Amino acid sequence: MTGFIQHTLQELFAEIPGDVLSTVPDLTVTGIVSDSRLVQPGNLFVALQGATTDGHRFIPTAVEHGAAAVVGTQPLQNVGVPYIQVVDGRLALAYLAAGFYSFPARQLTVIGVTGTDGKTTTANLIYEILMEAGYPTGIISTVNATISGEVVDTGFHVTTPDTPDIQRYLARMVAAGLSHVVLEATSHGLAQGRVLACEFDVGVITNITHEHLDYHGTFEAYRAAKASLFTSLAETHAKRQGNPRTAVLNRDDDSYEYLDRVTSTKKISYGFDSRADVRAEDIVSTSGGTRFTAVGPGFFIPVESRMVGAYNVSNCLAAVAATVASLGSPTEAAQKGIAGMGGVPGRMEQIDLGQDFTAIVDFAHTPNALQRSLETTRGLTHGRVWVVFGSAGLRDREKRRLMAEVAVAQADATIFTAEDPRTESLDSILEEMAHGASTRGAREGETFWRIPDRREAIRFAIRNARPGDLVIACGKGHEQSMCFGEIEYPWDDRVAMRAALAERLGISGPEMPYLPV
C-alpha cells in the first residue's frame, strides 16, 4: 500500500502536536518506518530511543537502504540526508504514520480494549457483536488482525503492533469500507505510544493485576499506562459519525476507583457488583458453557455462551457494556454474537483425541489468570487437576513465586517447565518457582515436579493422568514460538498436547515439536 502513497514532509509535520526543533524540508517521502531493516528507498526513518536499543545507532543503515530523511531526538549533523530533530520521537512517529495514511482512525469508530487478562477474548466478543449488529468491523489483537474476512498474522510473540503497522491496518479497513474497529491495547503499546493517533471512541478495561513490572517498574506506572487509554478519550478528534467517548470500567476490579477518578468522559460500569450499570443475574454454569441474564440500562438480555468460568461472564459483560450500553447496538446482536463465539485460540481450548480425561491449553501467564483458570478447571472435573507451566526469562521475577504459590494451592499436581527462558538460566527460573511452591508446603516429587523440557513436562502429565482427570498447559496459548537464548523456535502447546495424547493412545498424530533443551 505504501508504494502508492506519497506525502511531503511539510504536510506530515503540520499535523504533529509535539515540538519540532529543525526546519522541515519540502521533500516527498514514500513511507514511514521505525525499523532500519525495513527501510525502502524514499522512506522516512524515525529513530526511537528504546529501553535496550537506540534507533539513532541504525541511522547509517537506514540511509544506506535509501531513507530520504531521518527523524530523531538527538542533535545530530552530517547524517547524509535531511535530519529533523523532535522532542518526542514516539509522538512524532504516531502522527507521521497516521498522517501518511490520512488519519484513518478519524473515519472509524474505534473501541480500545486493555487490561492484564481477558483482553483478546473481550475484544473478539465485541467484534462478534458488532458484526452481528451489521457494522462492518475489523479487529487488531495480539493474535492477528482481521480485515473484511482476511486474517493477517501479526507475528510470533506480539504485543500491540508497531505504530506504522497499526495505521496501515486502519487505512486498509477504511479502504475496505469498514465502519468500526476493535483494537487490543497492551500496556507496552500504550506506554510506548504505539496507539497514539488511534482516536479512541470507547475504552474498555478488563482488570489490572500483577504483570509487566519488569518493564514498568512499579504497579502505579503499569496502572497509569493502562489509564492513558481512558484519559485519551477526551482528546479524540471530532468525527463525522460522532464521538461516544465512553469508558467501560470493571466495577469488581481494584482499578475501578482509580480509573473512575482519572476519566473525565462518560463512564459505564459492569460486573457482578450490584452497583454496576451492566451486571449478570441468574448465572448457570456447566461443563459445556454458561447461561446468565445481562441486565443494564433499559435491557435484559438472556445470554448463552460456550465459554466457561466466571471470568468469561465478566468478559461478556464488558462486551455488552461496550456495544449495547455504549454504542446502542441491538440486544439481539449481543445474544447472537456471544452465542456464536466458540472461544479464542489457546484460551481454555480443549484438545480431544478420544482420551478418557480432559486436556486443555490456556494462555494464563499471570498470577490472576492462573488462579481463574485453575478455579474454572476445578469445576470441570471430579478427578485430579494437573497444571504445566513456566515463567519467562528477563521478565517480572516476582511472578515466578506468585504463580507457583497459586498452582500448588489450586492444582493436585504441578509441573514447572520452560516458558521462554531467553538468556536467563532455566534452572535458576525453576529453582525460584520450586522455592515458592515449597514455602506453601508442596512436596517436590509428590505434588510438584521440575521438568525443564516442556515436551517432556506435557508428556509426563498426559502419561500420568487417570480417567476423569484434567491436564492443563498454561502460559503459551496461541503463541507460535518459544525463545531460548535469542532464538525463537517454532512451538505450539496445542500441537505438543496432541502429540503427547497420540503417543499415549497409540494413534497417529502430529510430531512433537523440537526444542533445544
Image (spheres, grey):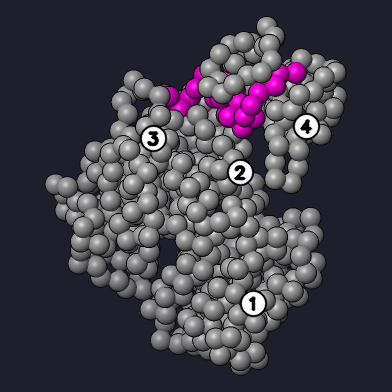
Marks 3 and 2 sit apart, C-alpha to C-alpha, by: 26 Å
Q: Which residue is mark 1?
A: 433
Q: CA distance from mark 1 to mark 3?
A: 40 Å
Under circle 2, the secondary element is: loop
Side of 491 relative to 318 (left or right): right
Residue tagged 3: 233
Classify residue 59 by image quadrant. top right
Q: Quadrant of residue 310?
A: bottom left
Q: CA distance from mark 1 to mark 2?
A: 31 Å
Which amino acid is tagged 4?
Answer: His
Farthest residue in the top direction?
26
Measured as percent of width and height from the top left, residue 4 is found at 63, 16
For marks 4 and 1, give the one nearer the viewer: 4
Tell me the element at label 4.
helix
Choose between 257 and 325: the one closer to the eye: 257
Please report the bounds of the magenta region as a residue range.
Answer: 83-111
Residue 292 vertical position relative to residue 64 in the rendered view, above or below: below
Say which of 125 and 185 sits in front: 185
| Image position of 44 with respect to 116: above or below | above
> How many C-alpha atoms fall within 10 Å of the one at disc 4: few (<14), some, or many (≥20)?
many
Q: Position of residue 230 (x, y in %)?
A: 40, 41
Q: Nearer the viewer, mark 2 or mark 4?
A: 4
Q: Residue at x 52, y 52 (%)?
A: 222
| Residue 402 seen from this side | yes
Quadrant of the image for the N terminus? Answer: top right
The residue where tag 4 is placed is 56
Number of numbered tags placed on the structure image: 4
Quadrant where the image shows the C terminus: bottom right
The residue that disc 2 covers is 154
In terms of secondary structure, where does tag 1 sit?
helix
